[in-house]
Image (cartoon, helix red, strand yellow):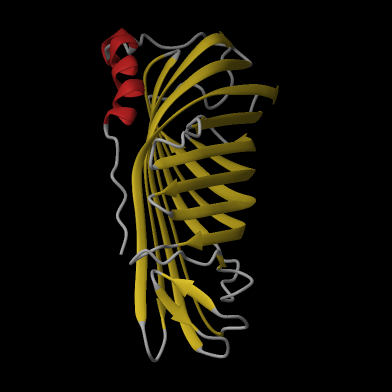
């Protein structure tokens, strides 16, 4: 079993920066009369149903025995499925937003191994029936500052802290093993929104973090997330979204390796107060 040693201070940096610049909610005094539909809220809550194509490659070492890079899709039969996501935005000022997102992807499959693999120090031979599972949790907290803000759009800076946990399991008639990696991850990025009509907008955002590789350090990784979507605001309080999102996470910690990607379209609904 493997549990990564998280560096909690990494997430603290963007959050401290956010705390120094976010004004009190009482300073938010309303919007001009010609602001776009859907841009006069203080709280926005969204729920999405994402249909991404998965790519999961994981290797786990134990007892000094190196692990095989196992493709959970090709080797174990993990299939595409719809995944829920929750998004909350608190807007204490016209140009300031606090963002919270929660995502969980849970996958499982039954299959017959088509090649011999080593996972967590245990060998699983070709032809062995195997039950596999992979859980991927991410909590994302961020601060957005829209340094350029107009009635029909904005451009902003994103500072984020994420907590990500990935747990992979293999169970067979002879052995049952799991590997778990978890770590806080900081990220920086940008967001832009443009209203093509007073109630229809296009938004694009991208965040990421790459830790430079260092042979003297026992952990390395990267995290990239980009999202482009259109929003139709039925009223100021209700809207619908259609988008495409790509999430890419890679880690290499204490001889354990993971490369995980989710890419696909989603539908979402939002309500505002």
Q: Is residue 113 left or right of residue 101?
A: right
Residue 90 location (% of width, % of height): 36, 27
Whether 203 is drawn above or below 106: the answer is above
In the picture, residue 152 is in which quadrant? top right
Q: In this view, does 254 lie to the left or right of 209?
A: left
Is residue 190 in sight in this rendering?
A: yes
226, 83: nearer the viewer: 226
Whether 260 is drawn above or below 63: the answer is above
Q: Is residue 155 left or right of residue 62?
A: right
Residue 21 location (% of width, % of height): 33, 10
Is residue 273 in sight in this rendering?
A: no
Where's the N terminus, which quadrant?
Answer: bottom left
Residue that appears at 56% across and 76% down: 76
201, 35: nearer the viewer: 201
Residue 134 location (% of width, % of height): 44, 66
Residue 248 location (% of width, % of height): 56, 45
Counting the numbered discs, the total is 0
Whether 221 is drawn above or below 106: the answer is above
Most extreme residue toward the right is: 196
Q: Is residue 164 left or right of residue 129?
A: left
Residue that appears at 60% across and 74% down: 75
Residue that appears at 50% across and 89% down: 129
In the picture, residue 155 is in which quadrant? top right
Residue that appears at 33% across and 30% down: 11
Where's the C terminus, which quadrant?
Answer: top left
């Amino acid at each position: 079993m493997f549990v990564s040693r998280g560096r909690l201070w990494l997430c603290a940096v963007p959050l401290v920066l956010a705390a120094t610049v976010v004004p009190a909610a009482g300073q938010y005094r309303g919007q001009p009369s010609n602001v776009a539909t859907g841009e006069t809220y203080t709280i926005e809550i969204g729920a999405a149903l994402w249909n991404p194509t998965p790519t999961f490659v994981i290797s786990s070492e134990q007892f000094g025995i190196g692990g095989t890079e196992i493709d959970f899709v090709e080797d174990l039969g993990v299939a595409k499925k719809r995944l829920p996501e929750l998004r909350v935005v608190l807007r204490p000022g016209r140009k300031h937003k606090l963002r919270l997102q929660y995502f969980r992807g849970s996958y499982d499959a039954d299959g017959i191994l088509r090649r011999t693999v080593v996972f967590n120090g245990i060998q699983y031979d070709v032809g062995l029936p195997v039950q596999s599972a992979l859980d991927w949790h991410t909590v994302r907290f961020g601060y957005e500052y829209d340094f350029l803000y107009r009635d029909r759009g904005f451009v902003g800076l994103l500072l984020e802290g994420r907590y990500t946990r990935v747990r992979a399991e293999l169970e067979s008639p002879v052995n049952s093993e799991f590997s778990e990696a978890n770590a806080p991850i900081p990220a920086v990025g940008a967001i832009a929104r443009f209203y093509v009509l007073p109630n229809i907008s296009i938004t694009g955002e991208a965040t990421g973090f790459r830790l430079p590789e260092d042979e003297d350090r026992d952990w390395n990784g990267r995290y990239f997330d980009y999202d482009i979507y259109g929003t139709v605001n039925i009223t100021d309080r209700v809207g619908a979204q259609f988008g495409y999102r790509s999430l890419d996470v890679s880690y290499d910690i204490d001889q354990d390796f993971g490369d995980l990607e989710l890419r696909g379209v989603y539908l979402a609904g939002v309500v505002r107060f």
